[in-house]
Image (cartoon, grey):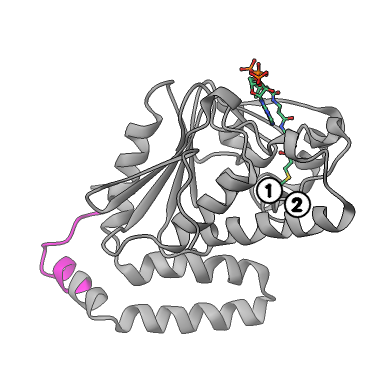
Amino acid sequence: MQAIPATLVVRQEGDLLLVGLNRPEKRNAINDETLLGLEAVFTQVPAGVKCAILYGEGSHFSAGLDLSELQERSLVDGLHHSRMWHRALDRIQYGTVPVVAVLHGACVGGGLELASACHLRVAEESTFYALPEGQRGIFVGGGAAVRLPRLIGAARMADLMFTGRVISGEEGVPLGFSQYGVPDGTGLEKARELAGRIARNAEMTNYALIHVLPRIADASQSEGLLMESLMAAIAQASPEAKQRLGDFLAGRGKKVGE
Ligand code: 1HE
């Protein structure tokens, strides 16, 4: 198993796992070592962890792909490299725990691709989104062509790449880049609050949201509806669901919004 490189910091806080990109002097540009480290971290999430938070040390979330490693690559190497990104980011999207990303400063190129593989995004005001691939003469390769249109729409993604447009953290909330916009310096606190709520969900609910909901979104209507029924039947039959429903009916459960 790949060791955790110094370009990542990983620590457990109770049932939360905090994973920090830790290459601030290079604006958390993601080199192969960091990417393989992320794959390893999300492949071996310790037992007892119920939710993870991904953030960036320093003044930016991530400046994307480490461009210094790109120049030397052949066509075939480029293909394998992109597939390596897909494999690593799939470990995040389809792993064992929901992942909340905390964004600030640059969230560009591969940094935006990484954020898109997480399940929730909290953006501080300083956040800015861009896909400089368009200006660098390359194309996205870390899954953005699939994941980003589902968040912001294909036309908006194309605009970012055609024109080099930069979207601010605040603008990004209604556009779907993030679900939460927060003042600078408060992203981790908000993520901890959200992760704490997520960690209290029934395990089967979180599993369904990570693994089943995105597959339903990819499926035809009739297949999607069948998958929904199967998942609904499995979830409602679990002892945890029966307990939670019973608690509510006995007046012990929380009301909506509590
Ligand atoms: C880097 C990278 C990088 C910074 N690869 N080294 N991403 C980009 O095209 C974004 C390129 N970066 C920037 O536009 C700026 O660095 C930022 C706006 C993010 C930050 O600006 P600033 O003024 O805070 O930092 P800086 O002075 O530009 O950079 C500090 C150092 O980080 C400097 O190195 P130094 O040795 O001269 O100190 C930079 O070279 C280095 N650095 N960004 C390598 N990206 C799976 S495919 C995905 C394809 C992509 O992601 S393409 C988009 C790449």
Label 1 neighbour load within 10 Å: few <14, some 14-19, many 20+: many
Q: Is residue 75 left or right of residue 224?
A: right
Q: Residue at x 77, y 26 (%)?
A: 165
- With respect to residue 239, does 4 lie above or below? above
- x%, y% of residue 216? 59, 71
Foreground of the two, 188 or 14: 14
Left or right, residue 118 beside residue 144: left
Picture quadrant of ligand 1 = top right
Q: Quadrant of residue 237?
A: bottom left
For the point 56% across and 45% down, the residue is 34
Which residue is disc 1 drawn over? 148
Write the start and end of the magenta stretch as one range: 245-256
Q: Does the closest atom of ligand 1 sit within 8 Å of the Cβ of label 2?
A: no
Q: CA distance from mark 1 to mark 2?
A: 6 Å
Residue at 62% over, 66% down = 217
Does the magenta-highlighted stretch encompass residue 2? no
Instruction: Tell me, yes or no, if residue 118 can be seen here.
Output: no
Q: Amino acid at mark 1?
A: Leu
Instruction: Give 38 or 201, whichever is nearer the viewer.
Output: 38
Which element is circle 1 on?
helix
* Towards the viewer: 255 or 78: 78
Q: Which residue is mark 2?
A: 145
